[in-house]
């Protein structure tokens, strides 16, 4: 692994220097633009918060829309558009705060807009992937323009934290407005243009500053455009060697913060190979996560054993780590009927992001060392993500971002949450998982709910529908004239609301 580290570092720096030289001989002049430009590795799939599930879409819709509630850094729910009171275990009243901003089309935000937004999510014809997280809602009543009553089928102490979907105008919902491309919210930014899915421009409403999101899939191109001043900052998705190299430059600032973004290997549980527990367990024990984190990721991650980090109030800090044990992996493969003369062959799907592809090739090499032959298939983000949602895979890698409340387990693992009704992309259908989730769902005590979720995380680590890999740090690489960007645990883009640029 040390040799791999040195070779990979040399390779990336050589590539960087070559392209750097070719790029700069044509022009060395910084851009004179007045915008703040962000380089993205992938484009947002949708700007409609009712359908946003990928990381970039989620982070950008937070700038365009506001929701009834939000979360602080300790995963505690807090008011955003509204305060609330618990009238009974199945009755919550939300009161819109005074002096709310209008929607970007000039219409006021009222309780009717809240009601229409959540009814559209609950409407089975709309097929929102977030429906399952709020299906305890029995009725929504707009008491007056500033008051909304939610009545539930059953008591749910987590309920206020579920209302994080951005609010849309009722009138445009009824007209089937295309919020995916033409978002109309009441957030701190409004859309200016969205060209070719690769260049999104937003305007910050308090000072009219233009914020650009430019999709540049190649990390080297992102870095060079940053050095030339064509973009101002990059959030993550850069090889660690290049981040270290950039940190030494006077014109560049690098910030890091421990994050909660959960990266994992996912499996198709309906596939005859990856649906076999012995095979999944053999794969888990063949991956040397500690070495990858140390030598390939530059210690910019921490090992994970569950979806929620151990510091979360529903996290489980007592989980026993999946150990790197190649001998155990070979024994498990033998139990599944595979050996050197009859090797296991698996197809591993991944996006074409260069660093993700690099990590995949290292995992491929580690699996090969125990007798598992892995064929890597990489695709552009849209094709890859579409295949995962449709179940067209055996094994894949992805990350979960922005996880706040433990109802995410229902959304990801319950048998009723298979897409498009949720994110059970691996098609897990396990009686014990469903039972624990149902017990937690109907438990009125948060303390007892936490115990159910702790038990669930232990059980998931036993059956391995996912192999937990790591929680990735949040990294900001920016020009030195960018001021005020604060990194958050979940990696959101909220700091773009107030970040400044000293021209």
Image: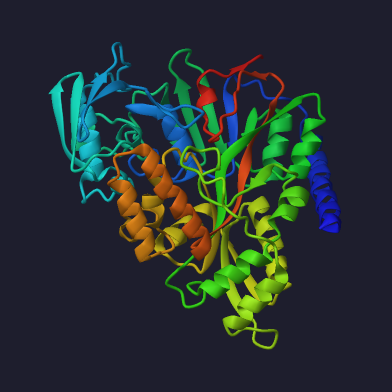
Relative to 286, is 203 above or below? Answer: above
Q: Nearer the viewer, residue 353 or 458?
A: 458
* Quarter of the figure with the N terminus: bottom right
128 left or right of 199?
left
Relative to 273, is 256 above or below? Answer: above
Q: Residue at x 65, y 66 (%)?
A: 285
Res. 130 visible in picture: yes
Residue 76 place in picture, x, y as percent = 43, 29
Residue 491 place in picture, x, y as percent = 55, 35
Q: Residue at x 46, y 60 (%)?
A: 388
462 left or right of 413?
right
* Quarter of the figure with the C terminus: top right
Res. 175 visible in picture: no
Q: Residue at x 53, y 18 (%)?
A: 498
Residue 7 place in picture, x, y as percent = 85, 55
Q: Nearer the viewer, residue 130 or 77?
A: 77
Residue 320 place in picture, x, y as percent = 60, 55
21 left or right of 480?
right
331 left or right of 433?
right
Q: How is the image coloured?
A: rainbow
Q: Residue at x 30, y 21 (%)?
A: 82
Q: Nearer the viewer, residue 377 or 443?
A: 443
């Amino acid at each position: 692994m040390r040799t791999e580290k040195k070779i990979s570092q040399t390779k990336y720096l050589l590539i960087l220097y070559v392209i750097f030289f070719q790029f700069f001989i044509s022009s060395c002049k910084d851009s004179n633009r007045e915008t703040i430009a962000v380089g993205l590795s992938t484009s947002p799939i949708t700007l409609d918060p009712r359908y946003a599930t990928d990381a970039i879409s989620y982070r950008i819709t937070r700038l365009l829309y506001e929701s009834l509630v939000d979360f602080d850094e300790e995963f505690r729910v807090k008011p955003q558009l509204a305060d609330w009171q618990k009238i009974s275990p199945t009755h919550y009243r939300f009161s819109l705060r005074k002096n709310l901003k209008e929607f970007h089309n000039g219409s006021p935000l009222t309780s009717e807009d809240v009601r229409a937004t959540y009814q559209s999510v609950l409407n089975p014809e709309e097929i929102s992937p977030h429906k399952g997280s709020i299906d305890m809602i029995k009725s929504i009543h707009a008491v007056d323009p500033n008051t909304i009553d939610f009545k539930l089928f059953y008591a749910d102490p987590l309920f206020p934290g579920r209302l994080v979907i951005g609010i849309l105008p009722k009138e445009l919902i009824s007209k089937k407005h295309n919020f995916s491309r033409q978002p109309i919210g009441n957030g701190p930014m409004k859309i200016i243009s969205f060209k070719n899915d690769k260049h999104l421009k937003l305007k910050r409403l308090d000072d009219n500053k233009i914020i650009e999101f430019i999709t540049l899939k190649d990390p080297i191109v992102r870095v060079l455009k940053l050095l030339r001043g064509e973009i101002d900052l990059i959030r993550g998705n850069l090889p660690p060697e290049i981040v270290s190299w950039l940190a030494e430059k006077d014109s560049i600032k690098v910030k890091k913060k421990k994050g909660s973004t959960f990266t994992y290997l996912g499996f198709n549980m309906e596939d005859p190979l990856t649906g076999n527990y012995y095979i999944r367990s053999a794969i888990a024990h063949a991956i040397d996560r500690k070495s990858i984190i140390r030598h390939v990721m530059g210690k910019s991650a921490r090992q994970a054993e569950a979806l929620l980090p151990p510091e979360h109030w529903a996290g489980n800090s007592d989980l026993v780590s999946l150990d790197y044990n190649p001998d155990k992996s070979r024994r498990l493969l033998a139990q599944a009927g595979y050996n050197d003369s009859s090797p296991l062959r698996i197809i591993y799907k991944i996006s074409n992001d260069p660093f993700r592809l690099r990590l995949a090739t290292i995992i491929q090499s580690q699996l090969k060392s125990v007798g598992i032959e892995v064929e890597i298939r990489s695709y552009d983000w849209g094709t890859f993500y579409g295949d995962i949602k449709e179940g067209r895979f055996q094994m894949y890698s992805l990350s979960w971002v922005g996880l706040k409340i433990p109802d995410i387990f229902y959304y990801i693992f319950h048998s009723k949450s298979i897409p498009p009704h949720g994110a059970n992309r691996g098609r897990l259908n396990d009686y014990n998982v469903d039972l624990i989730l149902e017990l937690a769902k109907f438990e009125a005590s948060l303390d007892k709910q936490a115990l159910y979720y702790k038990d669930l995380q232990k059980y998931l680590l036993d059956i391995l529908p996912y192999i937990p890999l790591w929680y990735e740090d949040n990294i900001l690489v920016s020009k030195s004239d960018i001021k005020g960007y604060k990194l958050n645990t979940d990696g959101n883009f909220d700091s773009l609301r107030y970040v400044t640029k000293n021209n």
